[in-house]
Image (cartoon, rainbow, N blue to C red):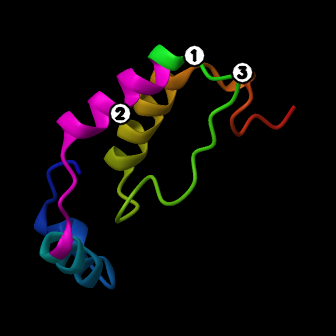
Amino acid sequence: MPRVRRRDLSGKRLFGYKAWRAKTKHRRDILDALTRDILKRQPDHIAVTGDLVNLGLPEEFVLASEWLRLLGPPEAGYGHPG
C-alpha cells in the first residue's frame, strides 16, 4: 500500500482503509519470496485472482502493474486480450 494522504480517504475509501489497517497482515518480503518461488518453478501459466489494489488509488495501480511485470509480459498469457 502506498502512503495514504488524508485527502485520499474521501467517501467509502475511509472505511476501506480502516478495515484494511485493522486486519491486514500483508508483508512485502513474503510477496517477494512467493514471487521468487513462482519464477523459479517456471510455470507455463500463472493465474492471478482477487484484488490487486485496496483503495483504487493511482499509486496502487502503479505498484500492482510493476509486480505483474515481474511475473512476465502480458503477451505471455495473463490478462492479455489478444
Q: Residue lying furthest right in this view? A: 82
Pointer 3 residue: 76
Give whichever of discs 2 and 1 has the lower sequence position.
2
Q: Alpha-carbon neighbours of circle 1 within 10 Å: few (<14), some, or many (≥20)?
A: few
Could you tell me which secondary element the residue under label 2 belongs to?
helix
Q: Which quadrant holds residue 73? A: top right
Q: Position of residue 81 (x, y in %)?
A: 82, 38
Pointer 2 residue: 34
Q: Does residue 38 appear left or right of residue 5 in this picture?
A: right
Kind of residue indicated by mark 1: Gln
Q: Alpha-carbon neighbours of circle 3 within 10 Å: few (<14), some, or many (≥20)?
A: few
Q: Does residue 53 appear left or right of residue 14 in this picture?
A: right
- Point out which mark residue 42 bears: 1
Q: As rendered, which of 12 and 41 lies closer to the eye?
A: 41
Q: Does residue 60 appear left or right of residue 27 in this picture?
A: right
Q: Is residue 71 above or below residue 80?
A: above
**Residue that appears at 18% across and 74% down:** 23
Residues shaded magenta: 23-39
Q: Does residue 28 appear left or right of residue 44 in this picture?
A: left
* Separation of residues labelled 2 and 3 (CA atoms): 19 Å
